[in-house]
Image (cartoon, rainbow, N blue to C red):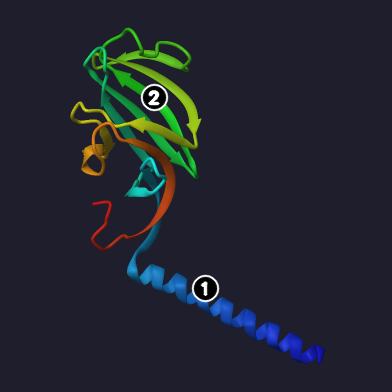
Amino acid sequence: MDAMKKASKCKGMLILGGIIGLAALLSFAFGLRLVPALVIKDSKGETVVRLPLFDGQFVHHFIHSVHKTPVDEYFEVHGKTLELKKVKYDTYGVGMPSDGGEAFTIENGRFVVTMHRSFLAIPVRVSIVPDHGIVIGDTLFPFTRWVAPESAITLSAGRMLIFQYGRISSK
């Protein structure tokens, strides 16, 4: 009886190994790739959109409510964590960081605060001011593309499977 159990277990392991090998081969053949993603959820916790981040980075772009000038928060995705790396802004004053970071500099006429702050999720209220959204590469994706102004959304990190050679590509 033990020999039958061992043979059955061995057969099961071979089948599992074959399935894993076939999945790896198909992934390679079809250019499947697992990449970091920015997940945007609505106030009910439903996923509104997943945006692939081929380099693991994005920028939260908005217009400051008091100064009426652009603010850019630079994030990197690390597993399930969003890490704020730096903030760039044009006007120094109320509501803008000036300390608490690792460095405070001026680059191309903009104030830059370098920091390392980690978040599992970031709650955001979508502004009625245009151009509040996410920049990936050189493309701005306004939040109003998916939800109405003044909606509550949450940004979080995830992963997504993409076709590297298909319709979704890094190029």
- Residue 28 position in % (x across, y down): 39, 68
Q: How many marks?
A: 2
Residue 83 position by quadrant: top left
- Residue 72 position in % (x across, y down): 30, 25
Read off the residue under disc 1. 20
The kind of residue on which mark 2 rests is Lys
In the depicted structure, whether residue 142 falls above or below residue 46 = above
Tell me the element at label 1: helix
Q: Residue at x 49, y 45 (%)?
A: 79
Read off the residue under disc 2. 86
In the depicted structure, whether residue 78 falls above or below residue 103 = below
Image quarter hosting the N terminus: bottom right
Residue 144 position by quadrant: top left
- Residue 121 position in % (x across, y down): 46, 36
In the depicted structure, whether residue 69 falls above or below residue 160 = above
Mark 1 or mark 2, earlier in chain: 1
- Residue 38 position in % (x across, y down): 37, 44
